[in-house]
Image (cartoon, rainbow, N blue to C red):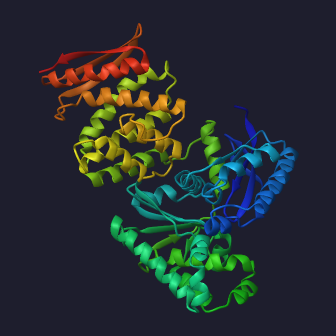
Amino acid sequence: MPKYKIFAAIELGATRIAMQIAEVSKSKIISVIDDIKYELPIGKETYTIGKISYENVDKICSCLEKFTYIMKEYSIDDYTCYATTAIREAVNSEYIIEQINIRTGLKVSILSNEEERFLHNKAIALKTGYFDDIIAKSAVLVDVSSGSVQISYYRDSELKFSQNISMGSLRMIEELSELKRENTEFYDIISKYIDLEIDRLKRYFSFENKYEYAVFFGNYIPNIRRLCKIKSDDSLNYDSFEEIYKTLVNMSFEDISYKFGIPYSEVEQILTTIMIFRSFITKRNLKIVVPEITLTDGICVEYVEKNGYFHTKHLFRNDIISSAVYCAEKYNVDMKHTEKITEFAESIFKPLSKRYNLSKWDFMLLRVAAIFSDTGKYISLNGYKKYSADIVKSAPLIGLSKNDMDIITEIVSGCEGAAVLTKRRRLLASKLASVLSLAQALDTERRGNVNSVKASLKNNKLFVTAEASRDLTFEKRRFEEENEVFEDVFGITASLKIIRRR
C-alpha cells in the first residue's frame, strides 16, 4: 500500500448525508482534510410511512452528485459509502441503491445496526485517550441515533452485552406524534416512556449501578456539548447537566433555538437525546464523558485497519466473541465443551484455509457458530439445531453483518436451509459446518477425552492426530460418520489417528 491515500468516507444517515475527506497513512494515521454535511431528514418518511419518496431520493442523488465532484477535486484514491437505518428499513431500499449507482456511479452498502454501532465504538477507541482505561473498569456506552439506541456494557475490558432498542430521537417523536397533538405534557410522556424502556433493560441485563463510567455519543453531540459546557477532556459535570436539562424543559423550542443558536429543526431531537442520556445517570458520582465522534470517523478507522495501516489497541473482534458467550450462557451452554471444540476446529481449519481460500474472518464466524451450536438444547434435545438457529436469528451481535449472521444461522442448523444464502455463502457455510462437525466429534462424550489435536493436509487427505488419555471409541465412530459429509464438501477424506497417553 502507498505511503498515504486520500480517502472519502460517506454516510447516508437518517437526518443528513455526510462526507469526510481524510489522508490516511502510517505516520499521521488519519488526518481529516474536509467535512461536508447536507441536512436531509429522510428518516421521517421511513419511520412514518415505511418508504422514502421519489422527491427525497432525487435530493439524495443530487447531493451525492455534488459529493462526486468534490471527490474529483481532492483526487480521491478510494471511498466507502454506507447507508444506515433510514434506507435500511425503507421498503424501497434496493431501488434507492440502484438509482444512486445509476446517477452517481457510487456503490452504496447498507450497514446493519450492529455494524454501524461497532464502527462508532472503534472511532471512540481511536480518537480518545481514555477508552481502554474506562472499559478496564466498567462502562456503559450509550449511542443515540435518530432511529434507535445502542447500549453496550464493558467490564474488565470485555464487552458483556450490546443491546439495541428502537427508541431513537426521531423515531420516538414520529411514533408518538399522535400523543403530541392530544397532550400538552408531551415531554413528560416521552420521559416516562424512556425510563420505562431503560429500566426494563437494566433489570433484564442486571447492570444498574454497576458501571463507573457512562459514555454518551451519537447524533447532535456538537450542540449537546456546547449546551452542557463539555470540557476539552470530554468530561461532563453532573450539576451542569442537570442545570441545563431543567432549563431546557421549561423553555419553548423557539426560545431554545434563539438563546442557544441551535437550528429550530434540531431542538426537539436534541431535547429527546438529552432525556435518553439522563436516564443512565443513576448516581451523582458517575463519571460521564461525551466524545464527539461520527460514523464517518468509524468508516475511516475501518478502512485503515482493513488496509493494514494500524489497529486500535483494544481488539474489537474479541467483543464479538465475548458478547456471543454472554448470550449463549443464558441457555446453560457448557462453555468448557465449547472451548474444546473451538480449539479442535482451529487445528482442523488451519491446514484447509490456504487451499480452500478460508479467511480469519471465516474462522471468526465458525467460532461464533460453535458458541451457539448447543443453545437449542435448552428448549429441546430433539431437533435442537433448529432451535439453535432460531436463537441466532434473534440475537444480533455487534460487529456482524446480516450476511454474517445468516452464515452462522446456517452452520448451527446443520446446513438445513435455515437461512436464505447465495450459492457462494452457502458453500462457505457448508465448509465451516463440516469443520465444526469433525471438531464436535472429537468431544462426543464431553469428558475431555482428547487432550490435543493436530492436523495436516497431504496428498488430498486431511490427517487428524488426537492425543488422548481415555478410550475414544465413540469419538472415532462419530468422526467417521462426519467424514462422509466432509468428503462431499471438500472433495478429500479425513483420517483420524489416535495416540494414547497414560
420 over 348 or under it: above or below: below
Q: Is residue 91 left or right of residue 323?
A: right
* Closer-to-camera residue (2/341): 341
Left or right: residue 199 versus residue 7 is left
> Between residues 489 and 476, which one lies in front from this camera angle?
489
**Location of the N terminus (image quadrant):** top right
Q: Residue at x 37, y 16 (%)?
A: 456
Q: Position of residue 230 (x, y in %)?
A: 61, 74
Quick check: 346 above or below 91? above
Name the spot of residue 327 as percent of width and height, x first: 35, 53
- Give the percent coordinates (x, y) of residue 452: 26, 26
Q: Specify whether residue 29 is in view.
A: yes
Residue 293 located left or right of residue 356: right
Q: Residue at x 41, y 10 (%)?
A: 460
- Residue at the (41%, 53%) spot, across then down: 395
Q: Position of residue 75 (x, y in %)?
A: 84, 42
Quadrant for residue 225, please give it: bottom right
Image quarter (top left, top right, bottom left or bottom right) of the C terminus:
top left
| Up-down relation of residue 411 to residue 293 (above or below) | above
Query: Which residue is nearer to you in this view: 142 or 228?
Result: 142
Quarter occupied by residue 241: bottom right
Q: Is residue 315 visible?
A: no
Q: Residue furthest top?
A: 459
Residue at the spot x=76%, y=62% of the render? Answer: 56
